Amino acid sequence: MEYCINHPEKEAYSVCHNCGNHYCQDCLIEGGEYYYCAKSECRNAMKNEKLSEIPPQIVCPSCQSVIAIDKNERLKKLVRCPECDSLINIAVNPPGIVKDDKFVQILSSMNQGDLGIIKSMLDDGGIDYFVNGENFLSVDPLIQPARIMVREDQFDEAKNILKDFELNIFGVSSNQNDDEDEDLES
Ligand SMILES: [Zn+2]
Ligand SMILES: [Zn+2]
Ligand SMILES: [Zn+2]
């Protein structure tokens, strides 16, 4: 049987999560998840535990969409935004973008119709991409253009695919895309 380190006559109730010593109920403070003793370093550890509590959802720092955090992501403290594909560190407040893959900008556009076509072309070409700032675009198209980011190692491939798109804009190529009725002259 363990006894409180401060009160040798009292049976220990639990251990301090930080220092691991046994304490009676009077000597322990309940933190968010664990018990802590009264030592200042252990009190600090308790504060940090509270700070590191991760909310059930966060706002993506890149595209501002709201992302629900599941248990697995909570453990890893990392979540990938389903909207813009950013990898987000949720252990810090506010959440921060983690640079994992290298993405580079291939082009930018203010035109929603163009973006739709570009995205479907990249989808068809098996290119990993995300669009930076697309959500701003739908709110106010004049704030900033949406930037299409592709993985660095697929940049040339993507460029090749989008060459056709540029030709389509200027009406030079024969019309290979008959699935869109967008105004491509703008
Ligand atoms: Zn302690
Ligand atoms: Zn005690
Ligand atoms: Zn995002």
Image (cartoon, rainbow, N blue to C red):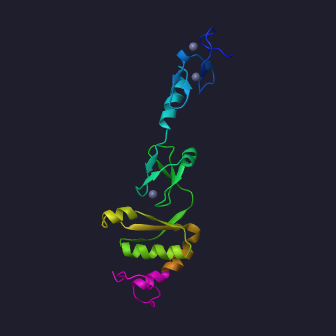
**Where does residue 120 sit, x and y in percent of width and height?**
48, 75
Residue 167: say if magenta: yes
**Where does residue 34 sit, x and y in percent of width and height?**
55, 29
Q: Please, which residue is most extreme toward the top here?
A: 9
- Note whether 143 is above or below 31 in the view shown: below
Camera-side residue of 154 and 174: 174
- What residue is drawn where x is 56% and y is 76%? 157
The kind of secondary structure the magenta stretch mainly shows is loop
Q: Quadrant of ligand 2?
A: top right
Which quadrant of the figure has residue 63? bottom left
- Note whether 4 is above or below 131 in the view shown: above
Quarter of the picture containing the C terminus is bottom left
Camera-side residue of 160 and 95: 95
Q: State whether residue 60 appears in this view.
A: no
**Where does residue 8 sit, x and y in percent of width and height?**
63, 9
- Note whether 61 is above or below 182 in the view shown: above
- What residue is drawn where x is 60% and y is 19%? 13
- Note whether 90 is above or below 40 in the view shown: below
Q: Please, which residue is most extreme toward the right here?
A: 1
Quarter of the picture containing the N terminus is top right
Residue extent of the magenta highlight:
163-186
Q: State whether residue 78 appears in this view.
A: yes
Residue 138: say if magenta: no
**Where does residue 128 sit, x and y in percent of width and height?**
54, 68
Which quadrant of the figure has residue 183? bottom left
Please state if 109 lies on the left or on the right of 18 as rendered. left
Please state if 181 lies on the left or on the right of 72 as rendered. left
